[in-house]
């Protein structure tokens, strides 16, 4: 039952240990495909031009440094809510969503899990179902608040794709009103998402079984380059009145990793219930952080509410997502050209192109990954996940050639 606590250092720390090894490596040809942060074609962090513009405006404004309210900056939380749910959303119109500013996506996941641990009427052993695999921190965040993370089938290593049958069967067999964590798009670490038709099937099952959807939205805009399309799973569930919450991060889509800008949106059954949820979330937030930080939220709220800045942001998101999609195509072509043997169970490397978002599950096994790290200074996690954003036109050929060598 549940997942045993991680050994030390926990799994969720290992990605930072990998980065430290990369930094210490003196090989000029080293490549970092570990951590999920966007890099431009020169391998450098990219400050979005729209963020530069909005930051300047925020700095030039005569804002003070008074505390924000416990639930955060209202123009930010309101605009962030509409960004995920859409202007025409049923629960938005019915004023049933409570939005609280959080310390990025991690803080949103934590506050959400804490809220569930206090107030959700669990049918069984305080279980929250998480995909196998998932973002390593989900386990830790859920366990920390005394809930039990339990895995559901998601990824099929044989096909390097979605195990939809296993996923569906598992949802059908869960007790009614189970809490299920879903990645709204660009699943981390697999890059494998359900299709729109599969989301429909999932939503119908949630309705039938009365399940609760715990959405993690860390990559809106990163999957397809289109903010609305990337939120279609959340919007579909909201339209069907499925009980749900959404953990939202602006780390990736605004490149604001260290500013910790995020929000938790909890959908109530009625406006009255939403207000009661708001009081409880305020009580929890008060004892945890009192009030969230203002700077990043000011920047994002300007971007979301100024039509010109919003259009520019959409262009910046396209720049990032298109470069990633381009790297997928180029890597696939290079591996084809080299006639690199595909991973076990696959006839080719097509999964590199069909996977979505920041990451790709390459299908490389642990020994091959270890060899890439130890013998080639190519840093990736041992499960074969690569951050596509770490590839660029300067290092892609070397990466493909090294993969070719380790798989032969
Ligand atoms: N959820 C998922 C699935 C993620 O991949 C991440 C970032 N790696 C987060 C949440 C949280 O990120 P942050 O706290 O930086 O917003």
Image: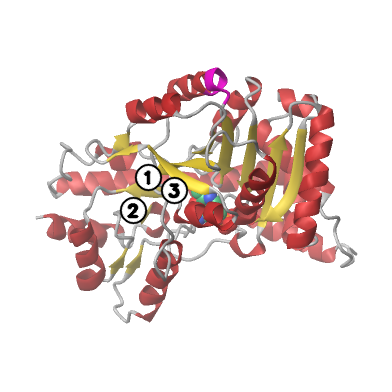
Residue beneath disc 3: 2
Left or right of residue 34: residue 341: left
Marks 1 and 3: CB-CB under 8 Å?
A: no
Which corner quadrant of the image does residue 166 belong to?
top left
3D distance between C-alphas at marks 1 and 2: 7 Å
The residue sitting at 87% across, 63% down in the picture is 67
Q: Up-down: is 46 above or below 100? A: below
* Magenta region, residue range: 206-210
Residue beneath disc 1: 190
Q: Quadrant of the C terminus?
A: bottom left
Residue beneath disc 2: 385
The residue sitting at 84% across, 37% down in the picture is 275
Q: Up-down: is 17 above or below 241? A: below
Q: Is residue 60 magenta?
A: no
Query: Is the CB–ligand 1 distance for label 2 below 8 Å?
Result: no
- Give percent across and percent down for residue 182: 51, 38
| Mark 3 neighbour density, 10 Å: few (under 14) some (14–19) many (20 or more) | some
The residue lying toward the viewer, choosing from 399 and 151, is 151
Q: Is residue 209 magenta?
A: yes
- Give percent across and percent down for residue 147: 55, 49
3D distance between C-alphas at marks 2 and 3: 24 Å
Left or right of residue 163: residue 108: right
| Mark 2 neighbour density, 10 Å: few (under 14) some (14–19) many (20 or more) | many
């Amino acid at each position: 039952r549940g997942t045993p606590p991680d050994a030390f250092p926990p799994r969720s720390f290992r990605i930072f240990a990998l980065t430290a090894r990369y930094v210490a490596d003196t090989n000029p040809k080293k490549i970092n495909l570990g951590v999920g942060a966007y890099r431009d074609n020169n391998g450098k962090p990219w400050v979005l031009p729209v963020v530069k513009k909005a930051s300047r405006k925020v700095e030039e404004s005569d804002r003070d440094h008074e505390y924000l309210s416990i639930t955060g900056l209202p123009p930010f939380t309101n605009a962030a809510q509409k960004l995920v749910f859409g202007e025409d959303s049923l629960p938005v119109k019915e004023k049933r969503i409570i939005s609280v500013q959080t310390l990025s996506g991690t803080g949103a996941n934590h506050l959400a899990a804490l809220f569930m641990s206090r107030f959700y009427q669990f049918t069984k052993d305080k279980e929250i179902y998480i995909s196998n695999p998932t973002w390593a921190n989900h386990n830790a965040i859920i366990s920390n608040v005394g809930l039990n993370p339990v895995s559901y089938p998601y990824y099929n290593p044989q096909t390097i794709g979605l195990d939809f049958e296993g996923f569906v069967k598992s949802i059908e067999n869960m007790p009614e009103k189970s809490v299920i964590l879903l990645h709204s798009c660009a699943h981390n670490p697999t890059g494998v998402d359900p299709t729109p038709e599969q989301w429909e099937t999932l939503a119908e099952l949630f309705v039938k079984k009365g399940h609760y959807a715990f959405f993690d939205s860390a990559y809106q805009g990163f999957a397809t380059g289109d903010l609305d399309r990337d939120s279609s799973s959340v919007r579909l569930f909201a339209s069907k009145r499925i009980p749900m919450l959404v953990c939202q991060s602006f780390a990736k889509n605004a490149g604001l990793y260290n500013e910790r800008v995020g929000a938790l949106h909890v959908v109530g059954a009625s406006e009255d219930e939403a207000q009661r949820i708001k009081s409880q979330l305020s009580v929890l937030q008060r004892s945890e952080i009192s009030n969230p930080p203002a700077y990043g939220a000011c920047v994002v709220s300007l971007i979301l509410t100024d039509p010109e800045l919003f259009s520019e942001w959409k262009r910046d998101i396209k720049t990032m997502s298109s470069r990633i999609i381009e790297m997928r195509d180029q890597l696939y072509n290079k591996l084809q050209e080299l006639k690199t043997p595909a991973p076990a169970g696959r006839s080719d490397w097509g999964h590199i192109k069909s996977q979505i978002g920041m990451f790709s599950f390459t299908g490389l096994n642990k020994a091959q990954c270890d060899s890439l790290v130890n013998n080639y200074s190519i840093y990736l996690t041992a499960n074969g996940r690569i951050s596509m954003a770490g590839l660029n036109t300067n290092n892609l050929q070397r990466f493909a050639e090294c993969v070719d060598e380790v798989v032969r």
